[in-house]
Image (cartoon, grey):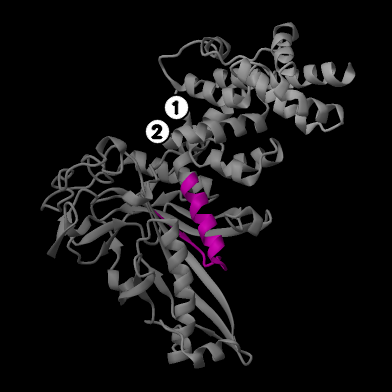
């Protein structure tokens, strides 16, 4: 919405505060769907299936079919609930949420209404995903509920290959996928807090192994509920809540929240409309134009005509089952992040890079188990490793190098047996599965080991010093200009084909020309 000159002037008199709550939909990576044995497209084994091939009579809502609860989906949901410090319900039930849409064949969704599986949790997240911005401050985000339901199908508005069509195509592969919906309180006051929470939640779910978490595939979808508190002349006004639907990237979340904040202030200045029953609406995000677009006026709860599902009995969750799930949970990313920063001395960027993928995190910790100093291990993995992982399109943990070899390369470099350039090259050699053995042997075979024996280097140094072209550098060195030593060291490195230890060479040159 364009801002007029008058609106710009009026804005100066306003105090505005952003208010955001989030709904997050997490597709659970079970083998089968929520209420049937049909394959689940959110599981890696069924990823990329042809449209409408992961269906059965239950998914299609055929007459006479009966749903059966997926126990693994319930277990995954409890796991997430525990990670968010939620209370796990002793008894939970299933409800039918009725609405009509082309990608919902039976015209209702099995969900949970008044007795959700997980309630009243909270999690502390960094106030910003940028350490320089957050200053290490944390923000508590309260969780209202996390309930389990089934996903709807998917409407495609382009033909395969991106061809334009004048209609929509329904793909029901996603219909019936176990879907955990997490709902927060409106505790977010800045877009940075929103993004930080989204990133933390995604990492938690991936660490727990409950989802692949590939946002481009819709495994996690974010829906911000946004309004603005406006203070003017001692009075407080609240704009109507807008829900932005189905955002599947952090960039889209950031852009839509930022845009909507400004748009709602402009709309209030233009219309004066405030929040009251029936004013909530849903909007979509146009990633090309970077604007939100009105979709429909939001339904109220009574419009969905919730009622208990007659085919599913209430489910009892025993304390023993909950504690069994808790005992199998790994240490969560935020706990590890604190340890990496406070105990290991890593900065926030290093810690977050290692924790972004749980397999990389586990590989890093496997290196530490070899008694490697954490800063050195992190530096090697995030420099030599990350470069190759980007080139090969894989994770650092999948490059082929072993934790023992990482340790050995660090020891060779710290012991000045190889240069930093050679260490990088040796890292790459160790990633090749055809190269087996310890790093020192591989370095020797590749001619990467430095020569530190002074007797072996004496001849190279004498040859360089005796060269008439070195006369000026020698005079500079004798005059106290240490930088000139570098020129002679470079000449020795050429003669030794890079095998000489530059530090030892520098000491030899000083001894011969200065110490006498």
- The quadrant of the image that shows the N terminus is bottom left
| Residue stretch rendered in magenta on the structure | 181-203
Q: Is residue 167 something one can see in this rendering?
A: no
Q: Which residue is mark 2?
A: 392
Q: Residue at x 76, y 22 (%)?
A: 506
- The quadrant of the image that shows the C terminus is top right
Image location (x, y in percent) of residue 296: 29, 76
Q: Quadrant of residue 480?
A: top right
**Secondary structure under badge 2?**
helix
Of residue 436 and residue 30, the one placed in the foreground of this image is 436
Q: Which residue is mark 1?
A: 399
User: Measured along the vertical axis of the image, is residue 347 above or below residue 21?
Assistant: above
Q: Residue at x 64, y 20 (%)?
A: 493
Q: Is residue 197 rendered magenta in the image?
A: yes
User: Measured along the vertical axis of the image, is residue 416 above or below residue 52?
Assistant: above
Image location (x, y in percent) of residue 86: 52, 51
Few, some or many residues within 10 Å of mark 1 (<14, 14–19, 20+): many
Q: Residue at x 39, y 43 (%)?
A: 211
User: Measured along the vertical axis of the image, is residue 443 above or below residue 295?
Assistant: above
Q: Is residue 81 rendered magenta in the image?
A: no
Image location (x, y in percent) of residue 69: 29, 44
Q: Can you name the residue that lies furthest to the front here? A: 468
Q: Earlier in the sequence, mark 1 or mark 2?
A: 2
Q: Are marks 1 and 2 in contact (CB under 8 Å)?
A: yes
Asked whether, in this view, residue 429 is left or right of residue 25, the answer is: right
Few, some or many residues within 10 Å of mark 2 (<14, 14–19, 20+): few
Give the label, 1 or 2, closer to the camera: 2
């Amino acid at each position: 919405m364009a801002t007029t000159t008058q609106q710009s002037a009026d804005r100066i008199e306003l105090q505005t505060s952003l208010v955001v709550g989030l709904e997050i939909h997490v597709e659970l990576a079970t083998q089968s769907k929520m209420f049937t044995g049909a394959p689940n497209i959110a599981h890696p084994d069924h990823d990329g299936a042809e449209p409408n091939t992961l269906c059965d009579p239950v998914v299609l809502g055929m007459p006479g079919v009966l749903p059966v609860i997926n126990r693994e989906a319930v277990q995954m949901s409890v796991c997430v609930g525990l990670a968010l410090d939620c209370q796990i319900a002793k008894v939970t039930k299933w409800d039918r949420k009725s609405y009509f849409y082309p990608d919902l064949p039976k015209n209702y969704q099995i969900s949970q209404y008044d007795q959700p599986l997980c309630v009243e949790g909270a999690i502390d997240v960094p106030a910003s995903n940028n350490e320089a911005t957050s200053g290490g401050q944390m923000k508590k985000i309260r969780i209202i509920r996390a309930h389990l339901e089934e996903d709807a199908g998917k409407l495609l508005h382009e033909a395969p290959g991106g061809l334009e069509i004048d209609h929509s195509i329904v793909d029901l592969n996603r219909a019936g996928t176990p879907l955990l919906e997490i709902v927060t309180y409106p505790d977010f006051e800045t877009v940075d807090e929103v993004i930080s929470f989204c990133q933390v939640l995604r990492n938690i779910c991936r660490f727990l192994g409950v989802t692949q978490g590939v946002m481009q595939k819709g495994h996690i979808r974010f829906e911000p509920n946004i309004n603005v508190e406006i203070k003017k002349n001692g009075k407080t006004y609240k704009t109507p809540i807008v829900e932005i639907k189905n955002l599947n990237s952090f960039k889209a979340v950031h852009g839509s929240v930022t845009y909507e904040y400004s748009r709602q202030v402009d709309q209030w200045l233009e219309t004066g409309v405030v929040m009251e029953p029936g004013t909530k609406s849903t909007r979509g995000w146009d990633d090309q134009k970077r604007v939100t677009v009105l979709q429909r006026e939001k339904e109220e709860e009574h419009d969905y005509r919730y009622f208990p599902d007659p085919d599913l009995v209430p489910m009892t969750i025993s304390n023993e089952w909950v504690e069994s799930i808790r005992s199998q949970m790994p240490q969560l990313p935020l706990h590890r992040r604190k340890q990496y920063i406070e105990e290991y001395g890593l900065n926030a960027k290093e810690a977050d890079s290692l924790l972004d993928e749980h397999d990389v995190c586990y590989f890093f910790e496997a290196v530490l188990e070899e008694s490697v100093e954490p800063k050195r291990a992190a530096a090697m993995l995030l420099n030599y490793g990350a470069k190759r992982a980007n080139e090969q399109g894989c994770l650092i943990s999948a490059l082929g190098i072993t934790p023992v070899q990482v340790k050995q390369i660090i020891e060779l470099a710290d012991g000045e047996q190889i240069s930093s350039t050679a260490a990088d090259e040796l890292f790459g050699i160790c990633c090749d599965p055809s190269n087996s053995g310890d790093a020192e042997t591989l370095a020797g075979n590749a001619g990467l080991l430095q020569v530190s024996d002074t007797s072996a280097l004496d001849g190279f140094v004498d040859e360089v010093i005796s060269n008439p072209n070195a006369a000026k550098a020698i005079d500079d060195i004798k005059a106290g200009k240490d930088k000139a030593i570098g020129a002679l060291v470079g000449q020795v490195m050429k003669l030794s084909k890079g095998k000489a230890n530059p530090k030892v060479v520098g000491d030899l040159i000083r001894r011969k020309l200065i110490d006498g």
